[in-house]
Amino acid sequence: MSDLYKREVTLSLLHEFTQTEGLRRHAYAVEAAMAAAAERTGNDTEYWSAIGLLHDFDYEQYPEAPDHPLKGADILRERGYPEEFVRTILSHAAYTGVPRENDCAKWLFAVDELCGFCMACAMVQPDKKIAQVKVKSVRKKLKKKDFAAKVNRGEISEGAADLGLEPDEVIAHVLEALTGVGRDLGL
């Protein structure tokens, strides 16, 4: 496996382009959810983790669509990342028109918005611990349009459907993955 996927390399690239702790924490959350998805499906954990860590690395510098993730894709290509890796990252933003052609892309799309939402759910817990968040609570908060209003609920449902899973199963997957890295997330 290429050194490009090693955590110290991807973490360095993330930190080069992302200074905001909140955006870094989102990357760590998606990284954890993708690592758990790779383990669950028998895929390469290092590769899937790298996808999760880098999916939004360009967002702080290029927050407007379609610059994000298109500018990031160009940077990844310049750094030697293969086209499949780049296309998987591009596919997490539906407006790019890049189809989700593999399991990694489908999982990235399914967990991206959900990671942010689950983190928001943890922030309203009395102890602010992700381990205290339950699937039922997440589902209930998803119905409240004013809670974490920027989270695209349609993409959460679409992501689960693309995987052939019930939303509750994907929520449980994300909560379990984030609980394992709660300290890194400040939760």
Image (cartoon, rainbow, N blue to C red):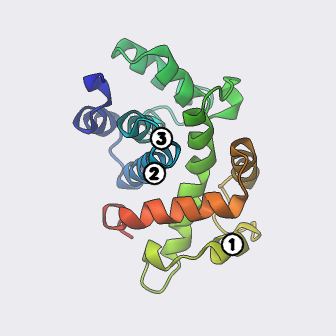
- Quadrant of the image occupied by residue 150: bottom right
User: Observer-nearest residue: 163 or 27?
Assistant: 163
> On screen, 97 above or below 110?
above
Answer whether labels 1 and 3 touch (C-beta < 8 Å).
no
Count of picture labels: 3
Mark found first going from the N terminus, 1 or 3: 3
Residue 54's spot in the image, x, y percent? 41, 36
Assign a secondary structure to mark 2.
helix
Assign a secondary structure to mark 1.
helix
Q: In the drawing, does residue 50 fall left or right of residue 41?
A: left
> Mark 1 or 3, which is nearer the eye?
3
User: Observer-nearest residue: 154 or 82?
Assistant: 82
Circle 1 residue: 141
Q: Residues within 10 Å of mark 1 (few under 14, many from 20)?
A: some
Mark found first going from the N terminus, 2 or 3: 2
Circle 2 residue: 36
Q: Residues within 10 Å of mark 2 (few under 14, many from 20)?
A: many
Mark found first going from the N terminus, 2 or 1: 2
